[in-house]
Amino acid sequence: MKTVVAAMLFAVAAPAAALAAPGQSAPAAAKFNIDTPVEVLAADPAAKAVLDADMPGMLTHPSYEMFKAMSLRQLQPFSEGKITDEILAKIDADLAAIK
């Protein structure tokens, strides 16, 4: 049983270790992405600037209070086609560039 558990732990840890060169840590995950709730993005000045640039008027939309806890990915199906895959990709890239 201990051998099985050890093998399972190794199987989970091995891919993460393979990403980093010896002596280096794994790359840090992006601070924000399209799965981050809109209200969290709006609370950060740099992320808010991305939303204002890529989706003008979103943060002042009359329904903001209703969707602010949702992520952009969750909001997409309710956007009547206004949040396209291309827009999500641009926003995701712009958010990932935030340091």
Image (tube, grey):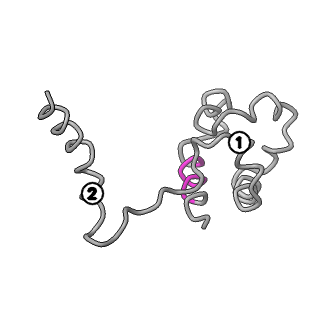
- The residue where tag 1 is placed is 38
Q: Nearer the viewer, residue 12 or 62?
A: 12
Circle 1 Cα neighbour tier, 10 Å, few/some/many (<14 / 14–19 / ≥20): many
Q: Position of residue 95 (x, y in %)?
A: 60, 57
Q: Which residues are magenta?
A: 87-93
- The residue where tag 2 is placed is 17
Q: Tag 2, which secondary structure?
A: helix
Specify whether 33 is left or right of 29: right
Q: Nearer the viewer, residue 3 or 17?
A: 3
Considering only vertical position in the picture, is 22 above or below 12?
A: below
Question: What residue lies at 53% left-to-right and 43% top-to-bottom?
Answer: 85
Question: What residue lies at 20% left-to-right and 36% top-to-bottom?
Answer: 8
Confirm whether the magenta stretch covers residue 88. yes
Q: CA distance from mark 1 to mark 2?
A: 32 Å
Q: Amino acid under label 2?
A: Ala
Confirm whether the magenta stretch covers residue 21. no
Q: Quadrant of the N terminus?
A: top left
Q: Position of residue 57 (x, y in %)?
A: 82, 47
Residue furthest out toward the bottom: 23
